[in-house]
C-alpha cells in the first residue's frame, strides 16, 4: 500500500477535463514537501510532467496543470486526447521514511 | 539528455548483478543520480540516490545493506551493485537524473532512461 493514495483509474471523453488526486499525510505533503507528477505511456519509461507542485517542464503542453493544498494534490488534464491514455504517478518526499515516495498510480482511459 | 541502462539479466536468488547507466548530453558530475524500479504492471519504487561529486548516498530500506550505488564521473556512468538478490527485487530498473547536485529532500526525477530488466528466479 502506497503512502500517497491515488485513484486506480479515471476516464473521460476526448476534449473533456479530468482530475487525478493524490492524498498524503503529515510527514509528506502536509509537511510542505513538493509533489511531482509523471506520465508513463504504455511500454515506455516514466516522463516528468509537473515538478514543484505546479511547474511544467519545457515541452509539456499547458493542458496539464496541477495544484497542492495541505495533504492533497491534484493533476488536471484538459482537452483530453487519445494519446493522453497512460498511467500517472504522483511523487513526494516523506520525512518519517526519509525516502522519496510514489503514489500507486492512476490509469487514465480516454473513452 | 540521454540515459542508457544495461546489465539486466536473469539471476538466481542470493546472486549478484551490476547495473550500469551511461549518461550523455549533460555535465554528469554536476547532478545527483537515482535508481528507481518498477515491477512490471505495478507502481514505481525509489531505490537509491547518489550526489554529483561528494559521494553521498541514500537507500530505500528495502535494499539497504544489499545494494550499492556508485558513479564514475570520468566515464559518465552510474552503477548499481546488487547483492543477495531476492525474488521481490525482480523489476525494471530505471536510472533517473536529479535536477540538483546534492542530495536534497525535495528531489525529483527529471529525466529517465529506458530501463533494464532484472529477473530473480531459480
Image (spheres, coloured by chain):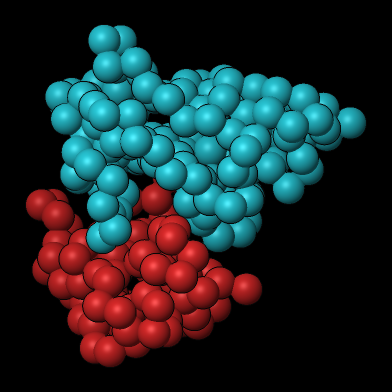
Which residue is at the far right? B122
| Quarter-of-image position of residue A50 | bottom left
Q: Identify the residue at image location x=61%, y=44%.
A: B63
Residue B87 position (above or below residue B81) = below
Q: Nearer the viewer, residue B122 or A97?
A: A97
Does residue B88 appear left or right of residue B66 in this picture? right
**Whole-percent x and y of residue A75?**
29, 77
| Quarter-of-image position of residue A19 | bottom left
Q: Which chain is cyan?
A: B
Q: Identify the residue at image location x=25%, y=70%.
A: A34
Q: Identify the residue at image location x=49%, y=80%.
A: A5
Q: Nearer the viewer, residue B75 or B121?
A: B75
Does residue B59 appear left or right of residue A49 in this picture? right
| Residue A84 appears in the rendering | no
Q: Colour of chain A?
A: red
**Whole-percent x and y of residue A47?**
32, 51
| Residue B84 appears in the rendering | yes
Q: Nearer the viewer, residue A17 or B2?
A: B2
Which residue is at the far top? B74
| Count of marks placed on residues | 0
Quadrant assignment for the N terminus of chain B: top left
**Whole-percent x and y of residue A2?**
56, 72
Quadrant assignment for the C terminus of chain B: top right
Q: Identify the residue at image location x=65%, y=35%.
A: B66
Does residue B99 appear left or right of residue B3 in this picture? left
Residue B110 position (above or below residue B30) = below
Residue A16 position (above or below residue B47) = below
Amino acid at each position: 500500500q502506497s503512502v500517497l493514495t491515488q485513484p486506480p483509474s479515471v476516464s473521460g471523453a476526448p476534449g473533456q477535463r479530468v482530475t487525478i488526486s493524490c492524498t498524503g499525510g503529515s510527514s509528506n505533503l502536509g509537511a510542505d514537501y513538493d509533489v511531482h507528477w509523471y506520465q508513463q505511456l504504455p511500454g515506455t519509461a516514466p516522463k516528468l510532467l509537473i515538478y514543484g507542485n505546479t511547474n511544467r517542464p519545457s515541452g509539456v503542453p499547458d493542458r496539464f496543470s496541477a495544484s497542492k493544498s495541505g495533504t492533497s494534490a491534484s493533476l488536471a488534464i484538459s482537452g483530453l486526447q487519445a494519446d493522453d491514455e497512460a498511467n500517472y504517478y504522483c511523487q513526494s518526499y516523506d520525512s518519517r521514511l526519509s525516502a522519496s515516495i510514489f503514489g500507486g498510480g492512476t490509469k487514465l482511459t480516454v473513452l | 539528455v540521454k540515459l542508457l541502462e544495461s546489465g539486466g539479466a536473469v539471476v538466481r536468488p542470493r546472486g549478484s548483478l551490476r547495473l550500469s547507466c551511461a549518461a550523455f548530453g549533460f555535465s554528469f558530475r554536476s547532478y545527483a543520480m537515482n535508481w528507481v524500479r518498477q515491477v512490471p504492471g505495478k507502481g514505481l519504487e525509489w531505490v537509491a540516490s547518489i550526489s554529483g561529486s561528494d559521494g553521498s548516498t541514500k537507500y530505500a530500506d528495502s535494499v539497504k545493506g544489499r545494494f550499492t550505488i556508485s558513479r564514475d564521473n570520468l566515464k559518465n556512468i552510474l552503477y548499481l551493485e546488487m547483492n543477495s538478490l531476492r525474488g521481490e527485487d525482480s523489476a525494471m530498473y530505471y536510472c533517473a537524473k536529479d535536477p540538483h547536485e546534492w542530495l536534497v529532500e525535495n528531489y525529483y526525477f527529471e529525466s529517465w532512461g529506458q530501463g533494464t530488466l532484472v529477473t530473480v528466479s531459480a
